[in-house]
Image (cartoon, grey):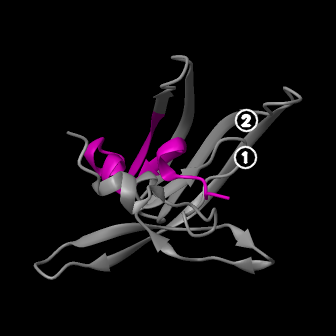
Amino acid sequence: MAKSVVEDCKKIGIGWLKKNNFLGGYRSGTLTWTSGYDDSKSSIGLTTDTNNLTVHFQYTQTDYYTEEKSDMDYQFRLETTPCNYGGFRYWFICGLYKSGRYCGRAVAKLYKPPGTKWFGCRHCWELSYYERQQSKVCKYRDWE
C-alpha cells in the first residue's frame, strides 16, 4: 500500500509565516486553503509569539463520516538556530506522539493529512512525496 503524500495535506511552513510577517513578536491572523477538488475553503487561526517561541493553532475539524465537529486549540513550540552569516532560523517542534513516544523533531513544515485532527511532521504521519511513489518506468519513460 502506498503512503499518503504531502501534496494531499494541508501544510503550514516557517517560510510562509516569515513571508506573511508572522515571525516578528506577537502576531495573529488566518491562513485559508482552497481545495483543488471542489473549491471548498478551510481556514485556521494562527497566533505567533516569537518572544515566547510559540505558535497557536485554532480551527474547527469536521469528521468526514459523522460530520461531528471538534474545536481544535493547541500550540507548538518554536526553536531557533543560528545561521552561518548572522541572524537565526525558526523551526517548529513537532508535538505529536507516535507509539507512545514524543516526537520533538525540529521541522520547517507541519502537515495535516486528510481525515486527521492534528498538524504534525511528515515523519510522524509517515508521509511521502508523490514523485517518490512513481515507478522508474513511468518516471523516466520516453512518451514520444
Q: Residue at x 46, y 48 (%)?
A: 12
- Is 33 on the left or on the right of 23, as rendered? right
Q: Secondary structure at mark 2?
A: strand
Q: Secondary structure at mark 1?
A: loop
Q: Indicate the quadrant where residue 75 lies.
A: bottom right
According to the image, label 2 marks what residue? 61
State yes or no: residue 4 in magenta.
Answer: yes
Residue that protrudes farthest toward the top in the picture? 39
User: In this orientation, does residue 110 appear?
Assistant: yes
Between 140 and 29, which is closer to the camera in this rendering? Answer: 140
Label pair 1/2, CB-CB below 8 angstroms? yes
Above-or-below relation of 41 to 63: above
According to the image, label 1 marks what residue? 117
The residue range painted magenta reads 1-30
- Residue 30 placed where, x, y %? 48, 32
Residue type at numbered disc 2: Gln
- Residue 86 placed where, x, y %? 14, 77
Using a 10 Å C-alpha cutoff, classify the residue at mark 1 as few (fewer than 14 neighbours), some (14 to 19) or many (20 or more). some
Q: Residue at x 35, y 67 (%)?
A: 90
Q: Indicate the quadrant where residue 107 lies.
A: bottom left
Q: Earlier in the sequence, mark 1 or mark 2?
A: 2
User: In this orientation, does residue 25 appear?
Assistant: no
Q: Residue at x 38, y 62 (%)?
A: 136
Give the total number of marks visible in the rendering: 2
Q: Residue at x 29, y 52 (%)?
A: 141
